[in-house]
Image: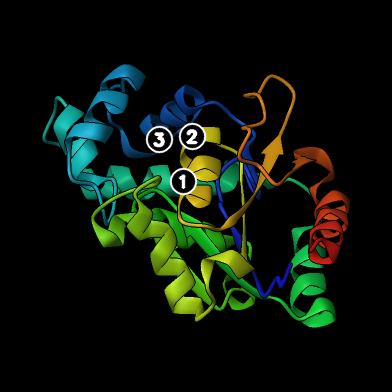
Amino acid sequence: MDLQAIVFDLDDTLVVKSRKRQVLFEEVTAVTGVSSLDENAYENAYYEVDGHETRAPIFEAILDENTVSPERVASAYRDAVNDALEPVGDIDHLLDHLTEQVGYQVGVLTDGPAAAQRSKLSHFNWSAYFEEIVVTSELGTHKPDPVTFETICQRLGVPPESVVYVGDKPDTDIAGAAAIGMIPIQVYFDGGPDVHPDAAAAVQRSALVTELPAALRTLSTEQ
C-alpha cells in the first residue's frame, strides 16, 4: 500500500481521562460556585443544543441559576478536563517518529466543541505535529458523516486510499473511514468494543506507541 498520511482520532485514542465526568463536575462546582451539575442532563443537552464552538450553550441549558455565566462554567469544565487528560503513552515520540523519521503527513479528525478539542491539543503542545486539524463541529456535523473524513483527506491533499485513520470507535471511526476508502486501524482496550470487521489492523491502546508503527510497516508492504 502507498501510505502517505496518518490521521488520528483524539479522545480515547491518543488521550484518556483519569477522572470520571461527575468528578469533573464536582470540581467545576467548587471553582465556580454553581450548586450542582447533573451528568444525565448534560448528556441530553449535548445532543440537543448547538455547542459547536464551546460548551457554554450546553451548560446554559442545564443551569438552574443565573448567578454564574455559562461561559465561566464551560471554561472551568474545559480546564478540569484538560487537567484530567493523560496521553496513552509517549505520544510525542510516536508523532516525531511518524513525521520526522518516516515522513508521513499527520492529521487529526475529532468530534467535539472546537475550543475544547483544540485546547486539548494545545495542552500537550501537539498542534505543531499536525499538518491539518479538523474538528467536526466546525463543519456543522460529526463522524461518521463522510464529509468529515473527506475533508481531512482533501486538506492533506492525499487520496483516501493512501490515508490511515486511527480511532477507537467501531461504528463512527472504523466504519466511517472505511466507507470513503481510507485504511482504518482500530485502537482496542480492555472492556472496550470488539474490533470492527472493516479494520485493516488493530493495536492495543496501552501499546500504541510500539504497535502502531509495526502495523503501518506491515500495511505498507502489502500489495
Which one is in front, 137 or 64? 137
Q: How is the image coloured?
A: rainbow
Mark 2 secondary-structure assignment = helix
Asked if residue 208 lies left or right of residue 152, the reply is right
Q: Please tell me whether mark 2 or mark 3 is closer to you in this view.
A: 2
- The alpha-carbon separation of the residues under discs 1 and 3 comes to 34 Å
| Residue in view at x 17 percent, y 38 percent | 49
Picture disc at residue 24:
none
- Circle 1 residue: 176
The three-letter amino acid code for the residue at tag 1 is Gly
Which one is in front, 80 or 202? 202
- The alpha-carbon separation of the residues under discs 2 and 1 comes to 7 Å
The three-letter amino acid code for the residue at tag 2 is Asp
- Circle 2 residue: 171
* Mark 2 and mark 1 residues within 8 Å of each other at the beta carbon: yes
- Mark 2 / mark 1, whichever is N-terminal: 2
Task: Note whether 149 is above or below 40 in the view shown.
Answer: below
- Circle 3 residue: 28
Across and down, in percent, residue 39 comes to 36, 21
Task: Note whether 136 is above or below 97 in the view shown.
Answer: above
Specify the quadrant of the image occupied by residue 105. bottom right
Q: How many marks?
A: 3
Which one is in front, 182 or 193? 182
Mark 3 secondary-structure assignment = helix
Asked if residue 216 lies left or right of residue 153, the reply is right
